[in-house]
């Protein structure tokens, strides 16, 4: 059972952002500091990737561990209330993610997913950038 009123929960949920999240901004700043230039949330591409490198035909999705069900991550747990709603919501997100990634791959794009928990320390951000630059020769 939810310990917040419907109004309180609505206010709380309305503050959750879909883009320009803290993990996205941290990664973008680090990429920019490395001299890498990119576009953000390109509406022309399936799924509006968070970061796009048109020159290298590479896209990056920065996924929140809870919202996209990062397997094995402590942040990816279902709430104790309204379980069926959340199961369906997370499952739909996962299916949409896979579809978007598949469409982009079929169009010749390199697709990388970086999880929120991979960006919570400076060292992890550096590792994520290293992974990107090695795999896609950015």
Image: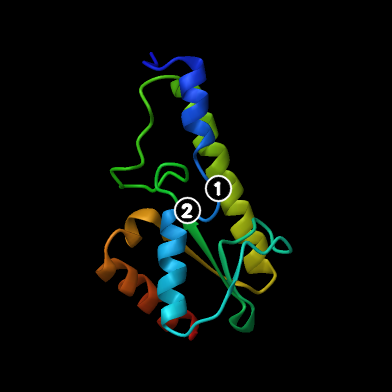
Between 59 and 126, the one lying in front of the other is 126
Q: Residue furthest right?
A: 44
| Residue at 45% over, 14% down | 5
Q: Residues within 10 Å of mark 2 (few under 14, many from 20)?
A: some
Count of labels in the image: 2
Residue 15 picture location, percent across and down: 50, 38
Across and down, in percent, residue 88 comes to 53, 30
Residue 52 appears left or right of 137 = right
Q: Which residue is mark 2?
A: 21
Residue 31's image quarter? bottom left
Which mark identifies residue 124?
Answer: none
**Circles 2 and 1: CB atoms closer than 8 Å:** yes
Q: Which residue is mark 1?
A: 18
Determine the secondary structure under disc 1: loop
Please indicate whether residue 96 sits to the left or right of residue 129 in the image: right
Q: Is residue 50 above or below residue 29?
A: above
Towards the viewer: 9 or 99: 9
Q: Would you identify the image quadrant in which residue 111 lies?
A: bottom right
Q: Residue at x 44, y 22 (%)?
A: 83
Q: CA gap, disc 2 to disc 1?
A: 7 Å
The x, y position of residue 29, in whole percent, is 43, 71
Please tell me in which quadrant of the rendered image residue 109 appears: bottom right
Q: Residue at x 71, y 60 (%)?
A: 43
Q: Residues within 10 Å of mark 1 (few under 14, many from 20)?
A: few
Q: Secondary structure at mark 2?
A: loop
In this view, 124 is above or below 69 = below
Residue 44, x across and y down, in percent: 74, 64
Q: Quadrant of the N terminus?
A: top left
Picture colour scheme: rainbow
């Amino acid at each position: 059972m939810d310990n917040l009123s419907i109004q309180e929960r609505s206010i709380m949920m309305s503050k959750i952002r879909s883009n320009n999240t803290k993990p996205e901004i941290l990664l973008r700043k680090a990429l920019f500091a490395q001299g890498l230039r990119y576009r953000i949330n390109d509406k022309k591409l399936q799924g509006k990737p968070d970061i796009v490198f048109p020159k290298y035909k590479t896209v990056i999705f920065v996924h929140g561990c809870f919202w996209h069900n990062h397997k094995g991550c402590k942040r990816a747990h279902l709430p104790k209330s309204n379980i069926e709603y959340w199961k369906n919501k997370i499952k739909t997100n996962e299916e949409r993610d896979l579809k978007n990634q598949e469409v982009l791959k079929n169009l010749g794009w390199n697709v990388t997913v970086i999880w929120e928990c991979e960006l919570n320390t400076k060292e992890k951000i550096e590792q994520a950038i290293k992974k990107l630059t090695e795999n896609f020769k950015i």
